[in-house]
Image (spheres, rainbow, N blue to C red):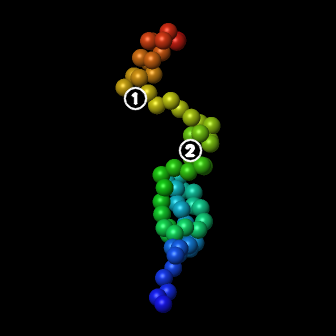
Amino acid sequence: MKDTAAHPHYRPSKIACACGAVYDTFSTRGDFAIEICSKCHPFYTGQQRLMDTAGRIDRFKKRYGQK
C-alpha cells in the first residue's frame, strides 16, 4: 500500500504586507506577500477616503441634487 497523504502539508508561514506588517501563521502555501492588511486598510483604520474616478461622484451629486 502506497503512503499518500490525503491532506496537504500545513506548515508555519509568514505573511508580509506592503505596509511592513508581518503576520506569523500556518499555511499550506508557505510564505507570501499581500498588498493590504487590517493595519493599513481604510475600513479598519477609519481613514476611508472617497476615490473620485473620472468625476463620477460629482456627476452623481449633480444628477440627484446633493450638494
Numbered tag placed on residue 53 in the rendering: 1
Residue 59 location (% of width, % of height) = 41, 17
Seen from the viewer's position, the closer of residues 6 and 50 is 6
Q: Is residue 53 left or right of residue 21?
A: left
Q: Tell me the residue at 45%/17% (across/down).
A: 60
Residue 4 location (% of width, % of height) = 48, 82
Name above or below for residue 18 compared with residue 7. Answer: above
Q: Which residue is mark 2?
A: 41
Q: Is residue 62 left or right of residue 15?
A: left
Q: Tell me the residue at 37%/26% (across/down).
A: 54
Q: Tell me the residue at 48%/63% (across/down).
A: 32
- Furthest toward the bottom, the residue is 1
Residue 53 location (% of width, % of height) = 40, 29
Seen from the viewer's position, the closer of residues 63 and 21 is 63
Q: Indicate the quadrant where residue 14 lies.
A: bottom right
Three-letter residue code for mark 1 = Thr
Circle 1 packing at 10 Å, graded few (<14), some (14-19), many (20+), is few
Q: Give the secondary structure at mark 1.
A: loop
Name above or below for residue 18 compared with residue 48. Answer: below
Q: Tell me the residue at 60%/49% (across/down).
A: 39
Three-letter residue code for mark 2 = His
- Furthest toward the top, the residue is 65
Q: CA distance from mark 2 to mark 1?
A: 19 Å
